[in-house]
Each structure stands twice: as structure tokens, then as C-alpha cells.
Image (tube, helix red, strand yellow):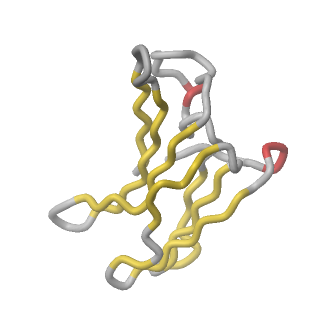
Amino acid sequence: MAYTVQNGGFGSASIDTVVQLKSANERHDILAFNCYGPAARAYTLSDENRGGTIHLNMHWTDPTHLSVTYDGKADVTMQVVRLADVNISLAVVPDSSAVGLAK
């Protein structure tokens, strides 16, 4: 699961995207990004804003490996590379090759 929060205000505006893994009873933050703006459609829930302005894509390559890609237009502020028996990889994919959206 991934979600994006867009905050506004003088000196406090930000676009933050967080990726989480859900276990049986709780969610765990595994990646956090400080995204560069602007959002395609500010403060609007729309398909144009899916992926948090960074073309975020997540897919399971096998039952123990989650692969996450983004376009490189964000600062990674937190990265977990392993949680329990799950390995998490992160890679930058140029804009033109970024395929898919957060699911």
C-alpha cells in the first residue's frame, strides 16, 4: 500500500509519499519520500496524482521480494531493506520508462 499527503501553508508545504507493508495485524512503513512538486492536480484525488508525483510502482517479484521503482524526483527519507522474511528493493527508473502506478 502507498499513500501521498500534500500539505499546504507558508513554510510548511510538502508532498510526502509513504509505502507500507501490511502484516496480519499491523502496517509497517518501509519507504518514505519527500516529493518535489507541484502535484499534477493540487489537493485533488485523481488518477493524475496516483503514484505521488514520482511515478511510484510496486510489484512482488516473488513471495519474499517487493520491488519498488520511482522516477528519482524525490528524496528518500526512510528505507527499510528487509522486514521479517521480505526483502525490499528500490530503484530509480527514468520518467519515460516509468510504467504503472501505485496499487
Classify residue 24 as left or right of residue 15. left
Q: Which one is in front, 45 or 31?
A: 31
Above or below, 82 against 66 in this view is: below
43 lies left or right of 72? left
Residue furthest to the left: 25
Q: Residue placed at 64% from the left, 57% from the top?
A: 69
Q: Residue furthest right?
A: 96
Q: Position of residue 86 (x, y in %)?
A: 41, 79
Q: Position of residue 87 (x, y in %)?
A: 47, 79
Q: Is residue 54 left or right of residue 84?
A: right
The relative height of residue 87 versus residue 13 in the rendered view (above or below) is: below
Q: Relative to residue 34, is residue 26 depicted above or below?
A: below
Residue 4 in picture, x, y percent from top left: 44, 36
Residue depicted at x 46% and y 65%: 79
Q: Quadrant of residue 50?
A: top right
Q: Residue at x 80, y 50 (%)?
A: 94
For residue 41, above or below residue 91: above
- Quadrant hosting residue 82: bottom left
Question: Residue pushed farthest bottom?
Answer: 85
User: Going 75% across and 55% down the picture, which residue do you hit?
Assistant: 93
Q: How many discs appear?
A: 0
Q: Position of residue 73 (x, y in %)?
A: 68, 43
Question: For this rendering, which residue is in front, 63 or 87?
Answer: 87
